[in-house]
Image: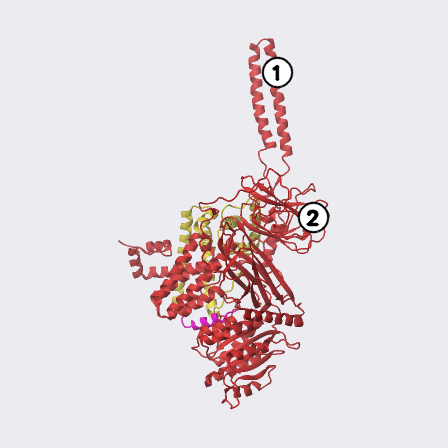
Amino acid sequence: MQSYANPIYGYLVRSGIRPADRDDLFQQVFEKVHRASLRGLPDGPVRPWLFTIAANTVRDAFRRAKVRSIVELDDTAGHAEPSDDVRPDQAAEHEEELSFLDQEIAKLPLDQREALLLCAVEGLPLADAAVALDVPLNTLKTRVRRARGALAVAAQRRRAMQEREGA
Amino acid sequence: MDVTHEAVHEALLELEPDEALDETLQAHLDGCEECRAFAAALEGVDSELAELPALAPDPALLERTLRAVEALPREVVREREPTGGTLGLFGAILGGLFSGIAALLGLLVAPFRGPSRKTWAIAIPALAAVGLVFVGGVGLFGVTNSEAPVATPASIPDRASQLVFEDTESTVDSTTVRGPVGADTLLPMGGRAEVAAADNGDGAGLAGDWVSRDAEGEGLDDSFFWRRSRGERGVVDLPRNGPTTTGAFEVDGRFGDVSGNTRGLALRGLVAPDGQRAEVFNGTDEEGDAEDRAQVHLPAQAQTQPRHAGYFDVGGEFDPPERPPAIDAPPPPPQNDEGRPVTRLPAPARPTEGLTFRSPTGYWANTYLPGDPAVRMLRRRLADDPAALRLAELAMPSEPSFDAPRSGALALAVEADRAGVEGRTRVTVSVGLRGAAQRAGRRPTLRTQVLLDLRRPLDEEGQGRVRALIDALARRHTGGDELGLLVAGPDGGTRIELGTMRFGEQTVALRRAFGPTPGDATPLSLRDALERSVESLGQVAEDAPLGSSMVLLVTPGLSDAESRDLESVAHLGALAGVGTTVVGLSADIALEPMERVALAGQGRRRRLERAADADDLARDEITAVSRVIARAVRLRVRLAEGVQLVDVLGSRSLDELQAQRVREAERAIDRALAARLGIASDRGEDEDGIQIVVPAFYADDTHRVLLDLVVPGPGPVADVQVRFKDLVRLGNGTLTERLVLARGGADRGPAQRAVHAAALGYRVSLALREAAAHLDAGDAASASATLEAARASLEAETRALPELASEPALARDLSLFRRYVAELQARPTSGLAGSLRYAAHRRLLGDPLGLGGEP
């Protein structure tokens, strides 16, 4: 369980799950994993199977809350691995960029967000991510592409704004 | 043709990493500021996505979740199946229909029949009614009896795994079982089970009750099944009650289902506690594969009959039991034309023939280098080139796949880069250590011997830096700390005796050191001076303070030959608990010789360019030594019979003289800790196996020793033991693990992939260093070629094992190689060599003490 705790927790956090609900959902995911494992583990890799459970749990949570995204990431969500030997000013700048990215990810539509998280953040191969999310491979690719495009546009805007402020 | 921004954006989004943009689109991109900005933003986003840090749940949440999962039922409750009641219900409906039709027909034909026929006409509906009642009753009975859920054993697919029974002093009830995630559902015996998830690289995983499902008290349903892995078989008696007397036995193999239908597990070895009983027989699984199985009886306390615990393969020292005649011995493996066994695996990627093997017994140099100062120095040199610095910072060490210790100072994890083999195979084995998060308490007493290299005179500025450094050290040495000064050079010798420094003492000592050489001066070589320094700190008199000792070698520069001369002394000092930190006094000092001595001496490599930095340097040294949580860590790896050692990656074997000094030094630490902290002395015995002694291990840190081995086939690979002085618990700590490879395919679970990734990381680091060396020689083309070759090799590995793509460090490596090649094309004469070296260091070592962030 421990080797999957971080990826699952990270997925929940970056999916935009409310901090108040996060712990419960985390527990729920592993309870579901346990129950599902009693019926047999998958023949293939375990990660896609785990993320199927996590993704469905997140979808259910949003469905219950009748929202598709809750942007609330500025709490102390988990403890990120500290970046070693980075100067404080650089670390702060880097952290700010990553925080911006997290915020933008949380603003993506749910289908794009989950596709992006599985492929680009959790590093699942496209085929596995498609299986995990139960969508055709091409659909998944499209979602990831759109998500990256949206993030790039947001980053572009931010950079332009910073340049204006700098000027 | 008009090209729109959107078309370019779409093309950029679809572009594969190595793919080039269509010429038309590229032409648009080159001339369009907006599209270039989008491309830059996209590249930034992709890079940042790869860098998003892992988020860890709060340990309390993890614990809570673990408990919640443990509390769940461990058996599947079957959903109601179309048997019994359900079938009865269908039967009742069908029966009713047929009966009704029959009765209707009977009534219709009755007026046209004779008297005898009329009887039948009446009888048919009557019979139909009886049938209806009967079938309905059966249906009702079935429904009633199908209410009770049927417990069925869980089925887990065939997968490589390892179970370790730790039964050190114990009864069966306290036996600890470790196995893959999910295995807790397969543990039907009474007792406590801990599932450590060797298969998933967890180290420690789920824990739960090892529940007996034996309602009848006979225990015959409590069984494991394991796939046979070796030919030995026999019987051993184990005690039925009371504490057992000897150690552990290990199980390795493949999980099957508890019902024993298929596959099963292989128990590879048994150190049998006296009196318990185990027996072995050959079996055949339902798939028809011939299997040898061993049967274990593990008695629960207060039971008169041994409980059947499963089947396993035991050591050959036991007599074979009588076997049931129906069970055949396994057929010999199929052979090829040359008479060699045919394996089901593809040919090994790495050669196993034509290799030179090293002795499986002997001392090897320690490669644990906490807070390597080389990282700090290289980083500092890159401060003026932020782009090169940022590039290098993409490199990161592979994530350790093992958990922190639950108690005590250290945890041990032993894994190979594959779970199973079929024949002679080359494998990489990782022996991983992880330090506890907590520190051992307040910083230990610090004893510092400053060794001043005055073989060449220092200029005024250099003298000023030395004064500032010694002043800073004197200020920061408090309480029982000790400080001394020894000078190497034409006027060598001790200038300040190791002890509490008196006010003004350093001023007098340095005045003499920097003054003209007196007529009666005695020259002292740097090597002799270092030996004397180590000896003075290594002597542990009864009244000497116990703590961290270090030599601070302050030098204006070392040649390559000088550093090689000092290396062995520094290493032996480190083994005796005396680290050697090298402080360079000039800006253009050669890094490699300093690094060599610092690495061998388990110390740090620093450069003091300004007197104003002296205080930070002193502070950092003291910070580094305050995080020690274990001392005298002795790692011993005993290879199983037939396993051959190719190399210990990144290390070197010590000769007999060095080994002897290691033993003496270790005993000195042992005695010192016994005298000062009451940790019982337990060293001094010679041991066989590959041995590495780590003088000190730091909190929150991890270290892997990678062994390149050739194994003859499935079976035991190595027994690993780690003994250490636990400064968390103030006692002796011992950890043991055995690595056994199953028979089977080369499937890699997360743990195996992590080992493979670590070995690849080592190769990545070597490639980065090699590229840096090419750049130093002014050969940018060769540097590019080296990086390209390394990238291609890494991509081939990733293609062969797609799951590797999810290893963040390797994903970054690919990006790193690409970017360096691009940078080399853009500015081949720039200071990228330093960046490459910095990346190479970061790739292997990281910066566990956080010293890289130079204040």
The three-letter code of the residue at mark 1 reads: Ala
Q: CA distance from mark 2 to mark 1?
A: 64 Å
Residue drawn at x 53%, y 63% as measured from the top left: B703
Residue drawn at x 39%, y 55% as measured from the top left: A149
Percent of width and height locating residue A71: 49, 56
Q: Kindly indicate which chain is depicted in yellow in the rendered structure.
A: A
Task: Report in which chain the residue with disc 1 lies.
Answer: B
Examine the residues drawn in magenta and state their main secondary structure.
Answer: helix
Dot 2 lies on which element? loop
Q: Residues within 10 Å of mark 2 (few under 14, many from 20)?
A: many
Q: Quadrant of residue B474?
A: bottom right
Residue B453 in view here: yes
Residue B310 in view here: no
Nearer to us in this view, B84 or B849:
B849
Nearer to us in this view, B54 or B642:
B642
Percent of width and height locating residue B533: 56, 78
The magenta span reads B371-387
Whether residues under marks 2 and 1 lie with C-beta atoms below 8 angstroms apart, the answer is no
Chain B shade: red
> Which residue was labeled with disc 2?
B300
Q: Which mark is residue B835?
A: none
Select label 2 or label 1 by which is in front: 2
Percent of width and height locating residue B322: 64, 42
The three-letter code of the residue at mark 2 reads: Ala
> Which residue was labeled with disc 1?
B123
Q: Is residue B746 above or below residue B837?
A: above
